[in-house]
Amino acid sequence: MNTISARRLEASDLLLRYQWLNDPSVHGQMMVSPPIGLAETQQWFSRTLLNESRRDFAFTLDGALPKEVVAMGGLTDILPRHRRAELYIFVRPGLTGRGIGSRAMVWLCEYGFSELDLHRIYLYTTERNDAARRFYARLGFQDEGTLRGHAFHQGRFIDRHVQGVLRSEWRKPREERQVPG
Ligand SMILES: CC(C)(COP(=O)(O)OP(=O)(O)OC[C@H]1O[C@@H](n2cnc3c(N)ncnc32)[C@H](O)[C@@H]1OP(=O)(O)O)[C@@H](O)C(=O)NCCC(=O)NCCS
């Protein structure tokens, strides 16, 4: 499979973002509640431009024409003092299971540890998203616990699982890790 490139999220990506987040295969696994409006997405984007504690990216496949966005992700709650950030990722509906998410994850972790000099990257999964938990574990994210009833989502309290990777852990096993191609 082609390698992946990342660029900062742009206003022209927002229509896609809004469409993907309203897709049940995406919002069913993330802490977003549809329907999400396009205007709401645009307002969110305007706020992110002023927010120094996050970096949002769009991913494209090298060599592919047209150069379509295949995934979006980012690092949020970047805290320079603690050198940690939360990671999020979602792949274009219909293109999951093809190695795109793995490549985007590796890019985001490399960016976080190398460019932002982070010490720790962590993420949350919602209950019932065991496939995503296994996916993150395979990339080196360790299970760090379950926050019981941590979020009120779609009418009920749900558990959230925390997974994280430290910079020291990320560098060593990286070469050995299998990234599906
Ligand atoms: C989770 C996600 C980012 C993984 O990216 P991807 O491109 O599908 O993953 P890859 O092709 O690189 O790797 C495939 C692995 O991801 C896992 N996976 C998790 N969710 C998946 C999904 N919705 N579809 C396909 N594979 C998924 C599979 O278990 C698969 O492992 P396997 O090869 O052992 O079967 C992507 O599937 C996605 O965006 N899902 C919907 C939203 C979501 O769950 N986001 C994460 C919220 S914490």
Image (cartoon, rainbow, N blue to C red):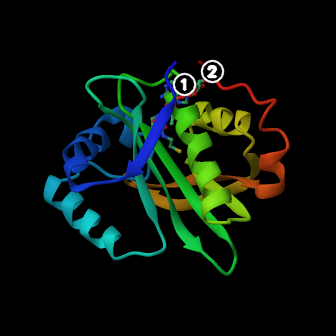
Label 1 Cα crowd, 10 Å radius (few <14 / some 14-19 / many 20+): some
Tag 2 near tag 1, CB within 8 Å: yes
Label 2 Cα crowd, 10 Å radius (few <14 / some 14-19 / many 20+): few
Q: Earlier in the sequence, mark 2 or mark 1?
A: 1
Q: Residue at x 14, y 59 (%)?
A: 39
Q: Which mark is residue 181?
A: none
Q: Residue at x 29, y 35 (%)?
A: 23
Where does label 2 land, which residue? 180
Residue 48 drawn at (x, y percent): 34, 68
Q: Quadrant of residue 87?
A: bottom right
Q: Quadrant of residue 27?
A: top left
Left/right of residue 33 with respect to residue 71 in the rendered view: left
Find out if the beta carbon at label 1 lies less than 8 Å from the nearest ligand 1 atom: yes
Amino acid found under the numbered disc labelled 2:
Pro
Find out if the beta carbon at label 2 lies less than 8 Å from the nearest ligand 1 atom: yes
Instruction: Please count the marks in the image.
Output: 2
Element marked by disc 1: loop
Where does label 1 land, which residue? 99
Q: Residue at x 71, y 53 (%)?
A: 164
Left/right of residue 162 with respect to residue 55 in the rendered view: right
- Considering depth in this image, is 9 or 41 the residue closer to the camera? 9
Left/right of residue 61 with respect to residue 164 in the rendered view: left
Residue 72 drawn at (x, y percent): 40, 44
Left/right of residue 140 with respect to residue 56 in the rendered view: right
Amino acid found under the numbered disc labelled 1:
Gly
Q: Is residue 65 above or below residue 80?
A: above
Q: From where the camera sits, is residue 35 visible?
A: no
* Residue at the left extreme, as displayed: 39
